[in-house]
């Protein structure tokens, strides 16, 4: 892949930069603008680089019908038994909240953008001058929406949850043909929460190789392990849901991170990025001072001039100022040039 960073707002994103960490607010505002603002503040305090909203209404996503097709099923779903319209009505972020939330995020120095779920949402977000767009996993087959988003000429982030390689290819082709130059694909497992066993983050490398774009992880697992591992595999973007407290409930609270956890996510993914480095053998500059604590060959018994070195008179011990241990057999039997005191490092010039 061509290593050329992209810019999302004022932040550079790419292999030469620390992971770009996005705090997803989703519906964890619980119907309160004040809580939404508090979530923005918590994300900023945790060190998130970006805050992301979701822009839809219940009526742009579905219709108000309670038949089986329109009711969430599955005992493992946090929304089981809820009608889609009811769920989206509760979870949506009112459109008139977007501007004050975005203003607060920008004031905290963060990038702020959103996931539109239909074309009218794109038009609305353009009026707010968002710097990027996110396509949700459930919309990655909505090619008309992808084309509409890509036509705005801004970076596009696409989650790949549930998508086959063919569907991802269709989405990428639609975005690029419509004008998208800066593309990010996020590996995603669309279960809530997701298990590590179902995360398959090895796919991240494959996405980068096939589609020649930035890659990342939209993570619904608990904890930071999957995100840290994803960075080691080349992820340059990490997205996680944030909540003030899981105990306070909310549509996404059960698989969202609390502020202290989110700070750990930011810190540990950055550490993972810094630790990758490059292929390197031998001591690093910071290790030079530790070389003295290696073992080396020392005289451990007072010797007279001409006396030969023996297993009784030399040992491989710390510190490391003497000859390397690999020379032990070679110096056995060699005679010392002069009287030598116990504690003297063995060197070639002291031997006959």
Image (tube, rainbow, N blue to C red):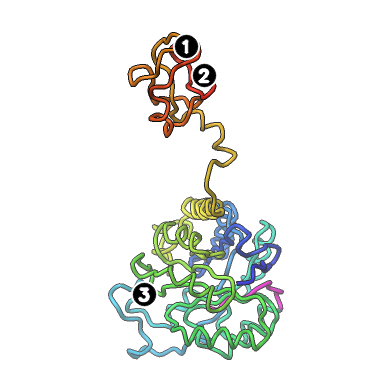
- Crowding around mark 3 (Cα neighbors within 10 Å: few <14, some 14 to 19, many 20+) is some
| Residue placed under numbered mark 2 in the picture | 350
Question: At numbered mark 1, what does the secondary structure look like: helix, strand or loop?
Answer: loop
Residue 260 in magenta stretch? no
Q: Which image quadrant: the N terminus?
A: bottom right
In magenta, the rendered stretch is 127-135
User: Which mark is on residue 340?
Assistant: 1
* Tag 3 near tag 2, CB within 8 Å: no
Q: CA distance from mark 1 to mark 2?
A: 9 Å
Q: Is 128 one of the magenta-colored residues?
A: yes
Residue at 51 percent of width and 55 percent of height:
269
Asked if 84 appears above or below 209 in the picture, the reply is below
Q: Which residue corresponds to the image point at 45% horizontal and 77% vertical from the top-left?
A: 161
Q: Nearer the viewer, mark 3 or mark 1?
A: 1
Between 343 and 185, the residue placed more toward the observer is 343
Of residues 190 and 123, the one nearer the viewer is 190
CA gap, disc 3 to disc 1?
A: 81 Å
Cβ atoms under marks 1 and 2 closer than 8 Å:
yes
Q: In which quadrant of the rendered view does residue 253 lie? A: bottom left
Residue 50, x across and y down, in percent: 61, 63
Placement of 127 over or under 243, stated as above or below: below
The image position of residue 268, as x and y in percent, is 50, 52
Tell me if I can see residue 335 in this picture. Answer: yes
Please provide percent x and percent y for residue 175.
61, 84
Quarter of the view holding residue 84:
bottom left
Answer few, some or many: residues within 10 Å of disc 2's Cα (few below 14, many 20 plus, some between 14 and 19): some
For residue 18, side relative to residue 321 (left or right): right
Per the image, the residue denoted by label 3 is: 79
Q: Is residue 24 left or right of residue 71?
A: right
> From this viewpoint, is residue 8 visible?
no
N-term mark: 3 or 2: 3
Q: Is label 3 in a helix, a strand or a loop?
A: loop
């Amino acid at each position: 892949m061509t290593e050329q960073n992209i810019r999302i707002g004022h932040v550079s994103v790419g292999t030469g930069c620390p992971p770009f960490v996005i705090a997803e607010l989703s519906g964890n505002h619980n119907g309160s603008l004040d809580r939404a603002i508090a979530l923005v503040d918590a994300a900023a305090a945790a060190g998130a680089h970006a805050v992301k909203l979701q822009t839809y209404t219940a009526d742009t996503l579905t219709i108000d019908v309670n038949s089986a097709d329109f009711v969430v099923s599955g005992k493992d779903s946090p929304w089981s038994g809820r009608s889609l319209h009811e769920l989206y009505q509760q979870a949506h972020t009112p459109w008139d909240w977007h501007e004050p939330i975005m203003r607060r995020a920008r004031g905290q120095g963060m990038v702020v953008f959103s996931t539109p779920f239909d074309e009218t949402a794109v038009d609305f977000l353009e009026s707010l001058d968002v710097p990027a767009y996110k396509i949700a996993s459930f919309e990655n087959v909505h090619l008309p929406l992808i084309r509409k988003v890509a036509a705005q000429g801004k970076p596009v982030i696409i989650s790949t949850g549930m998508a086959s390689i063919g569907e991802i290819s269709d989405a990428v082709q639609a975005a690029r043909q419509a004008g998208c130059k800066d593309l990010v694909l996020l590996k995603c497992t669309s279960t809530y929460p997701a298990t590590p066993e179902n995360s398959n983050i090895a796919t991240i490398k494959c996405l980068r190789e096939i589609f020649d774009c930035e890659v990342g992880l939209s993570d619904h697992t608990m904890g930071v392990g999957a995100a840290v591992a994803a960075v080691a595999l080349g992820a340059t973007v990490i997205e996680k849901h944030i909540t003030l407290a899981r105990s306070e409930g909310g549509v996404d609270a059960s698989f969202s991170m609390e502020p202290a956890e989110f700070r750990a996510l930011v810190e540990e993914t950055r550490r993972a990025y810094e630790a990758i480095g490059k292929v390197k053998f031998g001591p690093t500059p910071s290790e030079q001072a530790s070389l003295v604590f290696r073992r080396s060959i020392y005289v451990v018994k007072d010797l007279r001039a001409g006396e030969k070195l023996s297993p009784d008179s030399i040992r491989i011990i710390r510190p490391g100022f003497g000859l390397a241990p690999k020379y032990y057999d070679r110096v056995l039997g060699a005679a010392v040039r002069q009287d030598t005191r116990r504690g003297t490092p063995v060197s070639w010039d002291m031997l006959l």
